[in-house]
Amino acid sequence: MSPKPPLDDRLYPRDPRSVPLRLGLGDGSYVYVLDVELVIHVLADGPHHHVRVLGQAASALYAGDITVQQGKIVDLTNLSGTFQFDDADGLLRVATIIQELGFKVDSGAVRLFPIDGRRPIVLR
């Protein structure tokens, strides 16, 4: 995995609500960014939030969307207009890190959306 800068290189501040992913995170939809230290940071989903997760146009190893329900991951994707990662290995690495944190990842939850608009591919 190689760091990739956001497509929007403006120096947005880091959103103060951005936190490292950890057990106990409330149910909901979030954007996530995997930083260069292999820490997954999350922020409540919203328009153009990926660039604000780390702030300052910081590069990321991966980014996308994640949905938590009752303490488990029910959806994990690469959807991010800011970073546009589309490699399956990167998304599977994110899923592994999430499981190492103690989360259960539902079967069928890990979905890769090809950048060219083809149908999503269920990876796990």
Image (cartoon, rainbow, N blue to C red):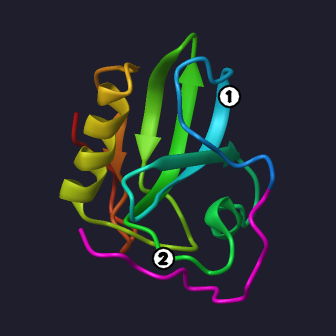
Give the x, y percent position of residue 24: 60, 17
Element at badge 2? loop
Residue at 31%, 38% (x, y): give it.
97
Residue at 49%, 54% (x, y): give it.
64
Q: Does residue 4 show up magenta in the picture?
A: yes
Write down the region rendered in magenta: 1-15
Q: Earlier in the sequence, mark 1 or mark 2?
A: 1
Badge 2: residue crowd in 10 Å (few <14, some 14–19, many ≥20): many
The overriding secondary structure of the stretch rendered in magenta is: loop
Q: Is residue 22 above or below residue 79?
A: above
Residue matched to label 1: 28
Q: Is residue 121 above or below residue 115?
A: above
For the N terminus, the image quarter is: bottom left
Give the x, y percent position of residue 99: 31, 27
Q: Residue furthest top?
A: 70
Q: Is residue 101 left or right of 13 when viewed as pictured?
A: left
Query: Which quarter of the figure has residue 113?
Result: bottom left
Q: Amino acid at mark 1?
A: Gly
Query: Which quarter of the figure has residue 34?
Result: bottom left
Residue at 44%, 49% (x, y): give it.
39
Q: Is residue 94 above or below residue 33?
A: above
Q: Is residue 29 left or right of 115 when viewed as pictured?
A: right
Residue matched to label 2: 59
